[in-house]
Image (cartoon, helix red, strand yellow):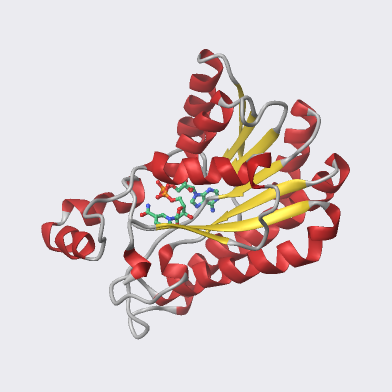
Amino acid sequence: MRLEGKVAFISGGAQGMGAVEARMFAAEGAKVAIGDLLSEEGRRVAADIGEAGGEAIFLELDVTSETQWQQAIAATVARFGKLDILVNNAGIGGQSTIEDTTEEMWDRVMDVNAKGVFLGTKAAIPEMRRAGGGSVINISSQLGLVGVDNSSPQYQASKGAVRLLTKATAIQYAAEGIRANSVHPGPIVTPMTESGRADPERNRLTLSRIPLGRYGEPEDVAYGVLFLASDESSFMTGSELVIDGGWTAQ
Ligand code: NAD
């Protein structure tokens, strides 16, 4: 199994891509901690993993809180003995122009999507050091690489911040065997894109921007995250894995 003996923490693992990654990681032999605001959904994912023969726990976590991050990582290590992998996946979207965006809207998205990744990484590094190394995987977006007219400035800025925070982490901790890479999904079938997919005009516009002509499935991204989590990617750090159906190729 590709993650045999490893312990992983996945933020935002109660639904969407994070939940698929949690199930895939457990099937590949990892012990998995899921941190999310959605406790009912998160507990269900952890229970499903247990019923399938894997090991998982759910921990309540708001990624904007440094205290909650510290408690969640401590609880993971208390339960599973160490931490090898952190997937900073929790995120929120948004649709607005710069002029329509209030300071509160900006702050909220930057807090969850950018500060949340910083706080998670900060909490995980000491445990990865104790484990003798680790892999941090930060979920950015294709919209952390290129601009678009119908997202929001705060979403794009936050995902661009994740891209460079990943490189800072990679450089600062490479000597300790702690790797950090960013993943840049294009539009994926998850609850986050539900309203856009249900709106015929927005759906048509999105599909027109994807050369492969379809939304990605959560598994399309999870396989990339699994690779970065495993030792198969042991010579990769500070890199950007783009899984976007060709969006950024044009
Ligand atoms: P989703 O909305 O289905 O799931 C996101 C999860 O994050 C939810 O379980 C939510 O409760 C959790 N979350 C949100 N705020 C949180 C907080 N403050 N603390 C803890 N948990 C919190 O989204 P998804 O589509 O699975 O997205 C996962 C990641 O991928 C996000 O970072 C998103 O920006 C990114 N992404 C998504 C797409 C897409 O098309 N779906 C494309 C590119 C990037």
Residue that sits furthest to the left in the current view = 200
- The residue positioned 49% from the left and 66% from the top of the image is 109
Residue 204 placement: quadrant: bottom left
Quadrant (top left/top right/bottom left/bottom right) for the N terminus: top right
Question: 94 or 169: nearer the eye?
Answer: 169
- The residue positioned 68% from the left and 26% from the top of the image is 4
- The residue positioned 66% from the left and 37% from the top of the image is 8
Question: 189 or 93: nearer the eye?
Answer: 189
Q: State whether residue 25 is above or below residue 225.
A: above
| Rendered location of residue 122, percent (x, y) | 75, 57
Residue 119 visible here: yes
Circle count:
0
- The residue positioned 20% from the left and 59% from the top of the image is 207
Residue 66 visible here: no
Q: State whether residue 171 is above or below residue 228.
A: below
Quadrant (top left/top right/bottom left/bottom right) for the C terminus: bottom left
| Rendered location of residue 197, percent (x, y) | 21, 52
In the image, taking residue 185 as reference, residue 69 lies left or right, namely right
| Rendered location of residue 172, percent (x, y) | 79, 65
Q: State whether residue 194 is above or below residue 15.
A: below
Residue that sits furthest to the bottom in the current view = 99
Question: 157 or 226: nearer the eye?
Answer: 226
